[in-house]
Image (tube, rainbow, N blue to C red):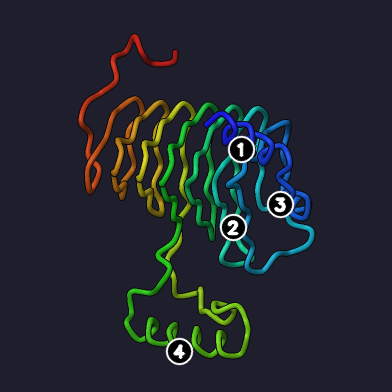
Amino acid sequence: MFFKIVDYLKQVKKNKKIGALKRFIDAGNSHFLGNFNLILSYPQSEKKYLIVGDDCMLDCDVIFESSDGNVSIGNRCYIGCSKIICRSSVSFGDDVFVAWGSYFYDHDSHAVDYRERENDIKTQLEDYRAGRNFIENKNWSVVNTKPIKISSNAWIGMNCIILKGVTIGEGAIVGAGSVVTKDVPPWTIVGGNPAKVIKEIPIDLRKS
């Protein structure tokens, strides 16, 4: 077991995946751990897709399915082996904890209109069979997207799903396995599917 821990630390220190991606990231003295990936479907060479503050530890996938969107992460954040999937904006404040297995999804992926979904399948097959990225010709104009905001001092438990347009208020806690479809008030604990307020965090445990 000790050998595996040491080996993991070496892997983290030698994470070469970041080298080719540095031009798309603006980061302070933060750390990108062994599972970190930045996935860009259609990168623009001059764009900084990911903005990261100081003293963060990131072990997540940050995925851009189009050339649009920005992800910003404040200072002193930890994001475990989770996925951030962005088309418009996903932002994290300072001192945010995110456990493993969570998803932040700022768009619907497909249209409500079934005819547009039929077209998605058709174009995916055409692109894939032609050796292209299978979403190269996807019609994003019919897909709803809204920014996600995770405020400072929030804690997102494991295996949560945070959907488009949601704001997690300051100091809020999202219980493990929750599906968040609406804004979460500051200094509350929510849980369930859909997530609902379970209780408020006592005033003496709130940041003044």
Specify the label residue 8 is tagged with: 1
Q: Measure how far apart labels 2 and 3 are at the Cα level.
A: 21 Å
SS at badge 4: helix
Specify the label residue 149 is tagged with: none
Which of discs 4 and 3 lies nearer the camera? The answer is 3
- Tell which residue pokes out farthest to the top in this image: 204
Sequence-first tag of 1 and 3: 1
> Along the line of sight, which residue is nearer the eye, 177 or 185?
177
Query: Quick check: 96 left or right of 131?
Result: left
Sequence-first tag of 4 and 2: 2
Sequence-first tag of 2 and 1: 1
Where residue 195 sits: x, y (%)? 25, 43
Is 80 placed above or below 94 here?
Answer: below
Q: Which residue position holds label 3?
A: 17
> Along the line of sight, which residue is nearer the eye, 71 or 159?
159
Which of discs 4 and 2 lies nearer the camera? The answer is 4
Which of discs 4 and 1 lies nearer the camera? The answer is 1
Query: Quick check: 133 left or right of 188?
Result: right
Is 118 placed above or below 91 here?
Answer: below
Q: Which residue position holds label 2?
A: 69
Q: Which residue position holds label 4?
A: 122
Where residue 69 sits: x, y (%)? 59, 57
Density class for disc 2 (Cα within 10 Å; few <14, some 14-19, many ≥20) is some
Q: Measure how far apart labels 2 and 1 are at the Cα level.
A: 32 Å
From this viewpoint, is residue 74 visible?
A: no
